[in-house]
Amino acid sequence: MKKFGLILLMSLVAFGVLLPILWMFDTSLKTMIETAHLPPRWIAPEMSLQAYVDMFNFLPFARYTLSSLITASATTVLTLVIGSLAAFALSRFVFRGKHLFLLVMLLSQMLPGSSIIIPFFELIRDLRLFDTHVGLILVHSAVQLPFVIWLLYGFFRTIPQEVEDAALIDGCSRLEALFRVLLPLALPGLGATAIFAFLGSWNEFFFALILTSSDATQTIPVGIGLFVGEYLDVWNQMSAAAVLFSLPPLVLFLLVQRTFIKGLSAGAIK
Amino acid sequence: MRRRITPILLLLPALVFTLFVLVYPLVLNLANAFRQVSLIHGVGQWVGLKNFVRVMQDEVFWLSLKNSILYAGLGTILSMVFGLFAALLLNIKIGRITSVFKLIYTIPWVISPVVAGFAWKWILNDQSGLINHWLKQLGLISDNITWLGSADTALLCVIIARVWQFFPFAMVMFFAGLQAIPVEQYEAADVDGAKSLDKLFHITLPNLRTVTGVLLLLGLIWSFNDFNMVFVMTRGGPIQASMVLPVLVREYSFVQFNLGKGSALSILIFMVLFGLSLLYLKVYSRRESL
């Protein structure tokens, strides 16, 4: 009986937590007229996937998606390559300034976006990279890198040094040991880190909003964020766009939820 | 000799990026703040503290400061209260079903803040929003409330949305903290005949002290920094009633085109957050050796 009560309580909380998302999903299945129906209702006489088709005409959603994919993928690759090298150095070598470097990595995750956006903007503009994918990729990578290094450093440290020592005795160089031994062993960690880096860039709004200005380079969150409230009567299509945009994060989250939750509790995720 | 060079070479790309993300922006920002810099006319002459004085003379700055403190403070504390509640609920052993609930409760933290803001904006819509409809059905209100359109309620609504989005983080942290409490402490209390509430206040909560500290600082830092929720839901409106400092930086720099004034404000924000971050580092390095 006590167990039943608890499950009921948990279900109620779950409904409350999911309510805004459920309502958004429900709205995405409605017609535009139905979204203005009074009183609002969950089940309308006419429900379809039409909004998911119409929104491609209303927003340049295909372009936004392409930009988001390009930016997030390139950011993931760039940060993982640079991050692996750095994390390798940090976890396998003893050198001066290591402690300081780690502290700086931790500290720069706290850096307010609003206090670095103006210099970023000026630099990107002066490099003639304003409103380009490359510009946004560089900025996203710079912002994500400390966190990626921090995660990879944690994963690399769990792999015993002896495994590499064996490879070194067999005549591998340090770099070969990194690529042939350490990285393959750290593959699950690399995968999880890649997902974090991808999502970080995929969901990022502030820098993308300020550093892009045309349909061809704006990412999905910028498209949604800018149009919210501007066009008041297309709630169904906006909902459809928001649902589609949320699918990759949700799927990836389900894939790595264990690592994700562990990472969360390590206090490392923004 | 070669051994010494190798780690530096490996770190070099990361160092370049760190300089780009940390050192360069801060230096340039500092230089900007003491100059006249316009988005359109470019860099002008040195103006001393004039930009800072302009910021301080702006009523909106003081309103935004108040709002930011409220948003960060209230948002963080409420997130922690709900997070602790959810963590305690999940910690009761009733079988595998709890892991499903844990997954569901984490979802607001996973979806993009832009989507979160959008979903809340829609559900709070004054005409066809679900919230107004339900409140009317319950007889709590007779007329529709313009939640995001009136100065009294706008900031409060954004804070609620922020709590909704941020509480899962607190929950997961608290949950990990609960798992780490040694079972022996509870067993000893059982032997002494302690009641559940005694155990909560004398064993559970004291053991969560460090997690609480870390959460409070991280929550304050991140919420104080947060641009997304306010921008998506209200743009700082109506008439700047829900303006917070990060949104004001954008307003100064890219709407009023005054990069000098924007830089001055962003340095003020940085100083507040740098203090909080150092405090966090102190707590963190005590908890975990690097």
Image (cartoon, rainbow, N blue to C red):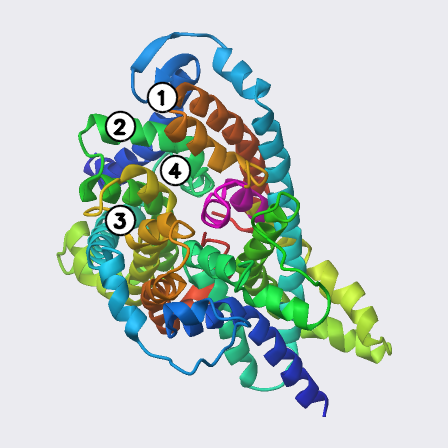
Mark-to-mark CA distance, 4 and 3: 17 Å
Mark-to-mark CA distance, 4 and 2: 24 Å
Task: Please tell me which residue lies in front, B209 or B274.
Answer: B274
**Residue B113's x, y, as percent?**
44, 55
Between tags 1 and 3, which lies in front?
Answer: 1
Residue segment shown in magenta: B219-237
Name the kind of residue labelled 1 in the image: Leu
Name the kind of residue labelled 2 in the image: Leu
Name the residue beneath numbered marker 3.
A79
| Residue for point 54% across, 57% down | B166
Mark-to-mark CA distance, 1 and 3: 24 Å
B173 in relation to B223, above or below: below
Name the kind of residue labelled 4 in the image: Phe
| Residue for point 13% across, 56% down | A171
Q: Which mark, by number, is residue A123?
A: 2
Q: Are marks 1 and 3 in contact (CB under 8 Å)?
A: no
**Residue B67's x, y, as percent?**
61, 38
Q: Which mark, by number, is residue B28?
A: 1
Mark-to-mark CA distance, 1 and 2: 10 Å
Mark-to-mark CA distance, 4 and 1: 22 Å
**Residue A252's x, y, as percent?**
34, 68
A31 in relation to B94, above or below: above
Mark 4 or mark 3, which has the lower sequence index? 3
Mark 2 — on which chain does it sit?
A: A
| Badge 4 and badge 1 both on one subunit | no
Mark 2 or mark 3, which has the lower sequence index? 3
Name the kind of residue labelled 3 in the image: Thr
